[in-house]
Image (spheres, coloured by chain):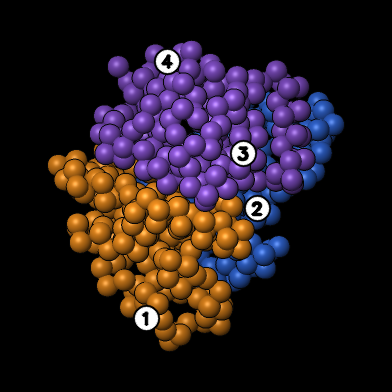
Chain colours: A blue, B orange, C purple
Amino acid sequence: MKKMSLLIFSGDYDKALAAMILANTAREMEIDVTLFFAFWGLLLLRDPQKMSTEDKTSYEKMFAAMTPKSPEDLPLSKMNFSGIGKQMLLSMMEDEDAPSLTAFLNGAIKKGVKFYGCKLSMEIMGFQIEELLPQVKVMTAKEYIEDALNSDIQLFI
Amino acid sequence: MKKMSLLIFSGDYDKALAAMILANTAREMEIDVTLFFAFWGLLLLRDPQKMSTEDKTSYEKMFAAMTPKSPEDLPLSKMNFSGIGKQMLLSMMEDEDAPSLTAFLNGAIKKGVKFYGCKLSMEIMGFQIEELLPQVKVMTAKEYIEDALNSDIQLFI
Amino acid sequence: MKKMSLLIFSGDYDKALAAMILANTAREMEIDVTLFFAFWGLLLLRDPQKMSTEDKTSYEKMFAAMTPKSPEDLPLSKMNFSGIGKQMLLSMMEDEDAPSLTAFLNGAIKKGVKFYGCKLSMEIMGFQIEELLPQVKVMTAKEYIEDALNSDIQLFI
């Protein structure tokens, strides 16, 4: 079985969309897909219903409060213009009946894409596993590399 | 024959330059090169002589008007300083007789690098194939993945 | 022996951190690691003790003066907030006893990670090999591609 491994470092709406389109498409082709979310990429996995301030230092609380609470809140990597550029992109996507980022995320989960949060990033940013989507498991950098070594496609997004 | 596949997501002058240097160098080594332009990457392929407002929604017209019209108009990913940083880079490149982005693009075309625009991105952004360089063909995400699976090097730029 | 090749284009503190964590972890797994620093990535390799204005054009002097002088001076790719966001990240890293970027760089050098500066980027930006960390060697794009072709993991960071 062919295998694709994406390291999702970025927390941008447009890059997340690209990653999710690749993940969904690969699964439709029966390719095994691993997504490893590190640093800003973890912001794609937050569940706005499950935010918690428990076990967080003051910095971690501040960080959690200052960063986007859900995938739909992520900014564009370019031309965000305080959100106007993003609204424009969303409208253009709707005109083409293209699904939203959340729809692509849900599609990926249903199709069996594997979601992993980077252990070290979660520790530094203070995100507990309970605050993330229930499908997410924790993975170390070592485990990511082992998995990537066995992949036919590896990308850093 | 060895094969390299670059997914060009970014619309930055400096990243485009890096991609084109890799593509040209690989072709000189007789490596087969596929470039898949998605999202902002499509801005590298616009032909300023062939802009059209036909079949465009209002958002698509606005988008086409607000974004760089040709590769040489792309900003830097960093230190652009409203164009001053970019002028500085261009002058430094000239001092070293390094070709411009357009020269690298033309070189890549002459050397047989294959150019593909992402179908979904073109639909969302409203770019018609007639508005892009004549060498560009349309490719789906599925076709990109099939091609990348057979590549020895895959990068997301 | 397995092999990993990272092309480090970005000059952001957070992306540099991600690259160095991958490089250190891979070496601990006895994977051969090549780092190819291009464009802004060269800013990770500057030795603040060894800056020189010799053989530099006026633009190159200006460029050297305007860009970060050492790895610890690099900004974040996001939420840098004129340095406040970065201080926050550094404090959060300290709370978790996570090493700084410099510590990861030194660790990578000790573990035998190979460091290469992109020849063309060094020429354009005017960096002499003497201004960079002593472990850095010069590499052309052609040599990078040859090396990447033989790697099991290739990422563009």
Q: Looking at the picture, which amino acid does disc 1 mark?
A: Gln
Q: Is residue A8 above or below residue A16?
A: above
Q: Tell me the distance, in whole angstroms, between the alpha carbons under discs 2 and 4.
A: 38 Å
Q: Disc 4 on helix, strand or loop? A: loop
Q: Is label 3 on the same chain as label 1?
A: no
Q: Residue furthest front?
A: C54
Image point (53%, 78%), residue name: B65
The residue that appears at 40% across and 77% down in the rendered structure is: B48
What whole-number distance in Å separates the C-alpha atoms at marks 3 and 1? 40 Å
**Do the residues under discs 2 and 4 have CB atoms within 8 angstroms?**
no
State yes or no: discs 4 and 1 in contact (Cβ < 8 Å).
no
User: SS of the residue at dot 2?
Assistant: loop
Q: Which residue is mark 2?
A: A74
- Can you identify the residue that label 3 sits on? C68
* Residue C50 visible at all: yes
Residue A63 location (% of width, % of height)? 77, 39
Position of B8 relative to C78 (above/below): below
Chain where mark 4 sits: C
Q: Mark 2 vs mark 1: same chain?
A: no
Q: Badge 4: few (under 14), some or many (20 or more) residues near its Cα, within 10 Å?
A: some
User: Do discs 2 and 4 belong to a common subunit?
Assistant: no
Judging from the image, mark 1 belongs to the subunit labelled: B
Q: Chain of mark 3?
A: C
State the count of labels: 4
Q: Amino acid at mark 2?
A: Leu
Residue assigned mark 1: B49
Rendered location of residue C24, percent (x, y)? 49, 20
Residue designated by label 4:
C112
Label 3 is placed on what type of residue? Pro
